[in-house]
Amino acid sequence: MRYLLVPTALLVGAALTVPLAPAAARPAAPAAGKTTVDLSLTPTTAMVGTSVTFRSMGAPATGVAGRAAHLQVDAGNMWRDVKTARYDTGGLAQAAFTSTGKGTKRYRVVVRSSGTGALLAQSATKTVTWQKVTWSPTLTIAKSAARVGENVPYTVTVQPTELSPGRRVRVQVKGRVTWQTIDSFVVNSKGLVVDDVTGYNPGLGRYRAQVVSSSGEALATSPIASVAWS
C-alpha cells in the first residue's frame, strides 16, 4: 500500500487560511455580574403637589435585592436625590414622590455600592410634566337673611378637593374701606371648612373666602356671599 505524505507546513498554512468572522459579526459575551436597572413613572403628567409613582426593576434580582434605588431629578448642573426605595427579593423598587414646582422635569434611578458609593447601575431618563394647581374656593352661607347676633353656619369648599386638606383658608368681611379677616382655618381631610358667621349691626354683610400661602399671600378668592342682617 502506498501513502501520500503531505508536508506539515502545508497543513498549517491551510489552517491559517480559513477566514474568521469579523468582530462585529460575533456576538458579544455578556459582562459577568453586570447590574441593570430601568425606570417607569406613572402618571407622566400630574398636578404640583400630587403623587407620581416610580417603579424600577433591577437585574439580576439577587444582585439588587436590599439595595437602594435612588430616584434623582435633573437640577440643571447636577442630579439631586428626591426619593429612595429598596429593591425587594424580586428586584422591584417603588415609591411615590411629588414636586413643588411646575414644568417638565427629567428623572433617573441610580444604584450605588453600599461600601464605596461607586455607581453600579443607572437607568435611562424619563420625564414628568408638572402642572400648576389652580385653586377655586367657594363660600356658602346657610342664610341670606338673619337677625343681628344670630350664628349663621357657613362652609368653605376648596377645589381641587384632593389637594386641599391642610391648605390654609381665611374668611373676610367687607368693612367700610377694606376687607377684614374674621376667621383663619386649615382645610380638613374632607376638603372643607365649617363654621358660622354673626352680624353685629343691621345692614348687608358681604363675605369672601381666600386660599392663602404659608406667607399669607392670597392664592385665590371666592365669589362674594351676602347676609342681610336685621
Image (cartoon, helix red, strand yellow):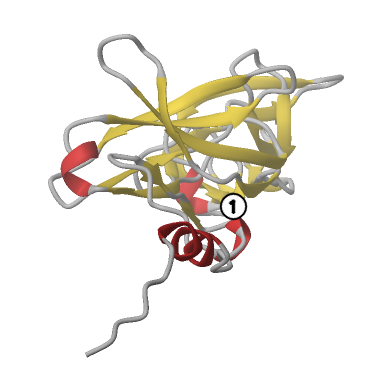
Residue 119 in view: yes
- Does residue 76 appear left or right of residue 153 in this picture? right
Q: Is residue 202 above or below residue 160?
A: above
- Does residue 95 appear left or right of residue 64 in this picture? right
Q: Nearer the viewer, residue 217 or 25?
A: 25
Q: Is residue 108 above or below residue 21?
A: above
Mark 1 residue element: strand
Q: Nearer the viewer, residue 151 or 217?
A: 217
Q: Residue at x 58, y 39 (%)?
A: 107
Q: Nearer the viewer, residue 36 or 97?
A: 36
Residue 48 rendering spot, x and y as whole percentages: 60, 41
- Does residue 115 appear left or right of residue 99 in this picture? left
Which picture quadrant has residue 32? top left
Q: Residues within 10 Å of mark 1 (few under 14, many from 20)?
A: some
Residue 97 rendering spot, x and y as whole percentages: 44, 38
Residue 35 rendering spot, x and y as whole percentages: 34, 40
Residue 152 rendering spot, x and y as whole percentages: 47, 43
Residue holding disc 1 = 46
Q: What amino acid type is highlighted by mark number 1?
A: Ala
Quadrant in the picture for the N terminus: bottom left
